[in-house]
C-alpha cells in the first residue's frame, strides 16, 4: 500500500503555502540586506596610513585621503601603487561582506527538490 500525504502537501512533504511564505521572507530579507550593504561605507588604509580610500557598498569612492608625506614628485609611481592597493583592498572588503551577508540569508532558503 502506497503512503499518502495529507492534502495540500507536495511530494517533498512540505506544505507549498508555507514554502512560498518562507521563500518570500528570504527574498525580502535579501532585498533589505542588499539595501543596507549598498548604504554601508568601507575604508581601506595602506602604507601605514599614507593612503586611505572610503567606498560605499555600491562601489562608489566617496573619499581619498593622501598623507602629504607620500607626495613626492620624484616618486609618483609609489603613490600610484598605494592608491591602487587601497582601492583593490576596499573593493575586496565590499565584495566579501556582500557575499557573506547574502550567503547567510540564502542558507535559510528551503530545499525544493527539482528547483535547481
Image (cartoon, grey):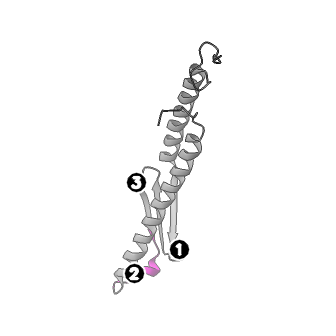
Q: Nearer the viewer, residue 38 or 52?
A: 38
Disc assigned to residue 49: 1
* Residue for badge 2: 78
Q: Residue furthest front?
A: 1
Residue 68 percent location from the top left of the image: 45, 77
> Quick one: SS at disc 3?
loop
The residue that appears at 51% across and 51% down in the rendered structure is 99
Quarter of the image holding residue 82?
bottom left
Residue 76's disc number: none
Which residue is disc 3 drawn over?
60
Q: Which span is picked out in magenta?
A: 65-73
Is the residue marked by circle 1 packed among few (<14), some (14-19), or many (20+) residues within 10 Å?
few
Vertical arrangement, residue 82 with respect to residue 113, above or below: below
Query: Which residue occupies the foreground of this view, 8 or 11?
Result: 11
Magenta stretch holds residue 70 = yes
Check if mark 3's residue and mark 1's residue have beta carbons within 8 Å: no
Amino acid at each position: 500500500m502506497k503512503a499518502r500525504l495529507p492534502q495540500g502537501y507536495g511530494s517533498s512533504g512540505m506544505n507549498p503555502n508555507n514554502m512560498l511564505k518562507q521563500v518570500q521572507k528570504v527574498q525580502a530579507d535579501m532585498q533589505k540586506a542588499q539595501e543596507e550593504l549598498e548604504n554601508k561605507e568601507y575604508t581601506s588604509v595602506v602604507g601605514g596610513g599614507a593612503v586611505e580610500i572610503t567606498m560605499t557598498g555600491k562601489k562608489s569612492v566617496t573619499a581619498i585621503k593622501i598623507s602629504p608625506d607620500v607626495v613626492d614628485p620624484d616618486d609618483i609611481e609609489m603613490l600610484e601603487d598605494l592608491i591602487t592597493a587601497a582601492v583593490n583592498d576596499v573593493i575586496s572588503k565590499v565584495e566579501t561582506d556582500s557575499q557573506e551577508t547574502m550567503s547567510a540569508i540564502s542558507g535559510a532558503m528551503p530545499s525544493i527538490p527539482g528547483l535547481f
